Image: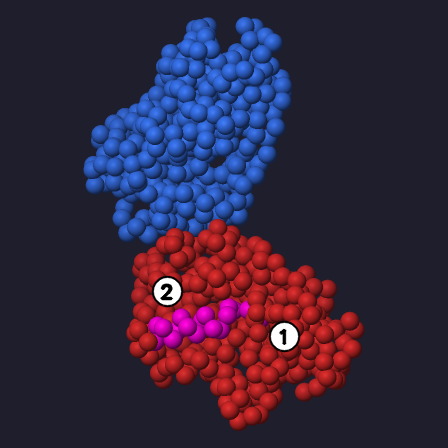
Chain colours: A red, B blue
Amino acid sequence: MRQIGKQEIEDIAIGAAVLGTGGGGDPYIGKLMALQAVEEYGPITLLSVEEVPDDALVVASGGMGAPTVLIEKIPSGHEVAQTFQSLEKYMGKEVFATYPIEAGGINSMLPLALAAQLRLPVVDVDGMGRAFPELQMTTFYLDGISATPMVLADEKGNVTIMDTIDNSWTERIARSVTVQKGGSATCAIYPMLGKNLKESGIHSILQLEEEIGRAIRLAKETNVDPVKEVLKLTSGFELFRGKVVDVDRKTEGGWARGVAKIEGLQAYKGENLEIRFQNEHLLARTKDRLLCVTPDLIAVLDAETGLPITTEGLRYGARCVVIGMPCHPKWRTEKGIETVGPRYFCYDADYIPVEQLAEKGSVAK
Amino acid sequence: MRQIGKQEIEDIAIGAAVLGTGGGGDPYIGKLMALQAVEEYGPITLLSVEEVPDDALVVASGGMGAPTVLIEKIPSGHEVAQTFQSLEKYMGKEVFATYPIEAGGINSMLPLALAAQLRLPVVDVDGMGRAFPELQMTTFYLDGISATPMVLADEKGNVTIMDTIDNSWTERIARSVTVQKGGSATCAIYPMLGKNLKESGIHSILQLEEEIGRAIRLAKETNVDPVKEVLKLTSGFELFRGKVVDVDRKTEGGWARGVAKIEGLQAYKGENLEIRFQNEHLLARTKDRLLCVTPDLIAVLDAETGLPITTEGLRYGARCVVIGMPCHPKWRTEKGIETVGPRYFCYDADYIPVEQLAEKGSVAK
């Protein structure tokens, strides 16, 4: 158990956006929400997953929808609390703590803001170890844990509770409600007992996010390469360096989908990288080589500062480094690949671990 | 208070489909559902609205979606009970009785089937005095009563609870959930206290439906004109007689929308009638004259038997009589016309009461 204050929030916001692999929401907005909540209600208690009683009710909080919408349609804070109140009423049980469903600039911050406001502890765990675009894409789902009862609320005050037969139905119904609510909404999701969270969650993710964020911040002060620091912490690989020359992006069906093209610079001159995304970066390849593919993590970092660039922040001319990081082993199982592998997203590629791809293609480590 | 058995169900199903003005679902399927429930669980208790205690919780039950879907995707019965169980859990209060939200072949029958199954009484009242395509189109809405908490369930077992800031948001969100659930679903809606139901509902609607259905049934036995009997009971007007020559129908956005063309026969030879519908018939006109427009009721009856034909039952060659009936006075207010008048449905026509249109055009009474 420890207290989370402003510095920790600043660092977690950055680190979470790195693991958010382009999705999970803008770290600047997420940070502001969490900072304001701490300003108003005081510091937040962070629990390790071992500190949660086995029979306690824990519930994830987060935003759902297209990040391109979320940067203009910011949660009011009020509706996040409302999702928890409605869920408690529906389940007839008090919530013990909250946790982030995924890593991301907003989705790691919303639970912190909510925790401050409702004076709940936050558990250092998530259900992805990265960000993914659909809500059944969790390690909880791999273990058969239901995403529902789930509550979805908008900033106007409309509340929707879903209780579905499986998590694909949750995704389907919740996505369409989110679109009706204006393309983004906040939710309380994956309510479960402490013992399930322990067994099926990805532990110590906020700690890793904080370490990544701190490394990027300190690199600037001590003049070391922030990208190298991130690669060390995540066992990652540098895949490419270049400048963004084209971004084709559509906000449709409650997602931001598209493809970004990056022209090689320095050692990569003459090559072109293509990154495909659906909220998150899912596949990176040059003309000849696959460099990294979901569920492994693809992050785009600013070449100078090492700060993560989200898909909605990709702009023509941006100088960037693209890195690949191995995903959590839970995703590298048969059911994991079936749930979040490249074929699920209709890419014509088999999953090959990033470290194997890096060896083959002699990508610089 | 009285008991409803098989004969009453047969009659109500027919009369409700007449007032359902083409929508509200197929009377044959509705009838089968209610008959089976009575067979299995025994007769149903029908209460007059005056018999409901002021502080009792009453909840409407019905189907939502396109009738064209509902004739193939029939409610299982199980999910109707589930909507009530979920609502009771969410509201933390026991339901005293159910009632139909509108008149219609299915939507007048579902509450009867549910009542038999859950051993609840049915109240002789509804919120429209006819059928309308959108769920905020109720006399409850005119008095500011919320449609939510509302529960929507499908035959697969997916349950969605909505708690919205106004009834237009309920319609918007519930419609999109219905589309995701396959284009039709069943709901528990407009939970309210007995005293609100008394003030804002349309009284004795099931009794009127039963009288209409009985008149049509007996007309056949006694060889009188069933259409004349219906006109007497509803203060209605014969608008047209002819044969269906064209039906242009699309099932889209959770509705059955379209236009039917009827070629005049007998006194109407040489004229053509056009009926526009969105689940329900909303406007009837010839080239020169408006004959009847929403919220007044337009029903298409079989020329021989007097049986109502729903929009999804309209077929080329069908010989029919089109009748117009004045709506309940609650709809003829400014807010009523704004909510369900022709301009709401984007028809370029002002509302004129059917009796005035009948006088002007010297339509046969």
Image coordinates for residue A81, horizontal then vertical, percent:
35, 64
Residue extending farthest left: B54
Main SS of the magenta segment?
A: helix
Q: Nearer the viewer, mark 2 or mark 1?
A: 1
What residue is drawn where x is 54% and y is 15%?
B288
Quadrant containing the C terminus of chain A in the rendered view: bottom right
Image coordinates for residue B357, horizontal then vertical, percent:
43, 15
Image coordinates for residue B287, horizontal then vertical, percent:
57, 17
Q: Are marks 2 and 1 on the same chain?
A: yes
Query: Is A345 situated above or below B182?
Result: below
Residue extending farthest bottom: A222
Using the rendered image of the protein, determine whether residue A85 is visible from the camera's viewpoint. yes
Q: Is residue B192 left or right of residue A230?
A: left
Stretch of the chain drawn in magenta: A22-38
Amino acid on which the number 2 mark rests in the picture: Gly
Query: Is B183 situated above or below B112?
Result: below
What's the mark number on residue A318? 1
Query: Around disc 2, counting alpha carbons within 10 Å, would you say few (fewer than 14), some (14 to 19), or many (20 or more)?
Result: some
Q: Nearer the viewer, residue B44 or B107?
A: B107
What residue is drawn where x is 57% and y is 87%?
A226
The residue that disc 2 covers is A77
Q: Report in which chain the residue with disc 2 lies.
A: A
Query: Is B269 situated above or below B212?
Result: above
Image coordinates for residue B362, horizontal then vertical, percent:
45, 8
Q: Report in which chain the residue with disc 1 lies.
A: A
What residue is drawn where x is 54% and y is 34%?
B256
